[in-house]
Amino acid sequence: MNGGRKWAAAVPAEPRCGRDLAELEGAGERSSGGPRGPSERTSGGPAATAPASGERGGDGAPSRAGAGASAMFAGLQDLGVANGEDLKETLTNCTEPLKAIEQFQTENGVLLPSLQSALPFLDLHGTPRLEFHQSVFDELRDKLLERVSAIASEGKAEERYKKLEDLLEKSFSLVKMPSLQPVVMCVMKHLPKVPEKKLKLVMADKELYRACAVEVKRQIWQDNQALFGDEVSPLLKQYILEKESALFSTELSVLHNFFSPSPKTRRQGEVVQKLTQMVGKNVKLYDMVLQFLRTLFLRTRNVHYCTLRAELLMSLHELDVGDICSVDPCHKFTWCLDACIRERFVDSKRARELQGFLDGVKKGQEQVLGDLSMILCDPFAINTLSLSTVRHLQELVGQETLPRDSPDLLLLLRLLALGQGAWDMIDSQVFKEPKMEVELITRFLPMLMSFVVDDHTFNVDQKLPAEEKAPVTYPNTLPESFTKFLQEHRMACEVGLYYVLHITKQRNKNALLRLLPGLGECG
């Protein structure tokens, strides 16, 4: 945490949660045609629209006629440039139309004396004047775009921003002209703070809003949570559908399953990349996304929102977005856990690091546990912790060590308990680590280790010469207390499930037949 800044990790008061969720969940229905500006939100009528760029008539101008076209080109008059209305007025009031047209062309054409004698050559080649003027216009516009980008990257910040602000002030009246709109949008893109009045005008117009760069949209979103929710909601829905599709895919196998993709591969997904781009370096937008994820996780209990919370942070980490990573107190913890997920194992060194982060939560900052628990609730984190727990138990058998004497195993159980209790913690707003059941460590895990011993004993006996074999049969019963643990303790059920998966991969038929009935008793 920086400078005592209060991190928005805690779920806010219920009324706000309700508002956020209502805004977010209604986004898809409200914004099927794009986000709405203030005028549309209040009146229900459509905001002013600009024609799409590409809708051109024969003279290179937009084909839409009437009031819309007049408004579109009204900005030219503000700059002292004649437009179609001026020509119309001239022709209406003149006595010699041909001379009036010739004079209009002379005054508004390319003011280059040597050009006039060269233009007839174009006529000889059958090249329309429109095509020539359009190519000149396009070339000049491209040069102007390059110059704007150059201004944005040279000189002192204060000076270049002043130049861009002056340019925006002069050109903004042309923002609805499809041919010049890219220039205005480029200027706004490079301004770290576009004047609020212009942002409101862009937000109120659907076409302008869609056309502006994400850098400009961020400035709009940070003061308009509902509009940002409209943009984020479809992405979150898409993410959940993709995860569920992958989870229930019929193409899964032992070699390629839901947990097979590496963390880095998963972060290249479309939704994570889009959210990363939308957030940029804006801490306020990042906080909003986290709030949406907490709220939806609280409402739906869907753990895939926890996965997205971790993936978004690590995606920003990969881009070295220090503005956000430096203020998210979960950053280093998530980074360390991400490395464990990549290796599918929590080794002793990383276990100590994770423990240091947990023990480092200071008094008065307990709300951070809410976000840490959500990160640990990520199915990929639970999978890694559970696999590591089973592996540690097997190692303890070889070391003849009890679970209670293994700090690494106790930490894994502590992390599992925190992840499994994420929803309850956020729902109750009581930010305390759940208490570990002593019997889970002193009775259940030793019982599980005894099954491992039974396996080893039976396997060793089977490898002995026939004359040395003892009449040993594989145990086929389970202690009643074991089944009770599976029914009453979620963590026991989780670890038991992963142990069964482990013996299944080993094709251990005897152990599977013994444990499977007990696992079926899990509630």
Image (cartoon, grey):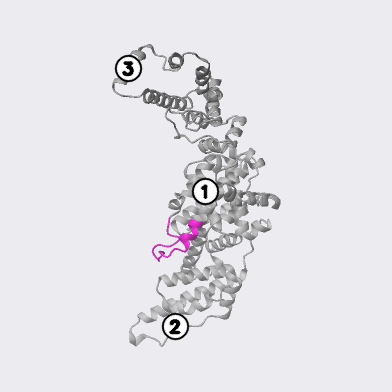
- Whole-angstrom CA distance, mark 2 to mark 3, is 102 Å
- Residue tagged 1: 312
Precedes in sequence: disc 1 or disc 3: 3
- Whole-angstrom CA distance, mark 1 to mark 2, is 49 Å
Residue most toward the top?
113
Q: Which mark is residue 132?
A: none
Q: Secondary structure at mark 2?
A: loop
The prevailing secondary structure element of the residues shown in magenta is: loop
Precedes in sequence: disc 1 or disc 2: 1
Q: Given the image, on which type of amino acid does mark 2 rest? A: Tyr
Q: Residue 226 magenta-drawn?
A: no
The magenta stretch is 241-261
- Image point 53% across, 16% down: which residue? 93
Q: Is residue 178 above or below residue 34?
A: above
In the image shown, does 65 or 384 lie closer to the viewer?
Answer: 65
Q: Given the image, on which type of amino acid does mark 3 rest? A: Pro
In the image shown, does 96 or 467 lie closer to the viewer?
Answer: 96
Q: Which mark is residue 474?
A: 2
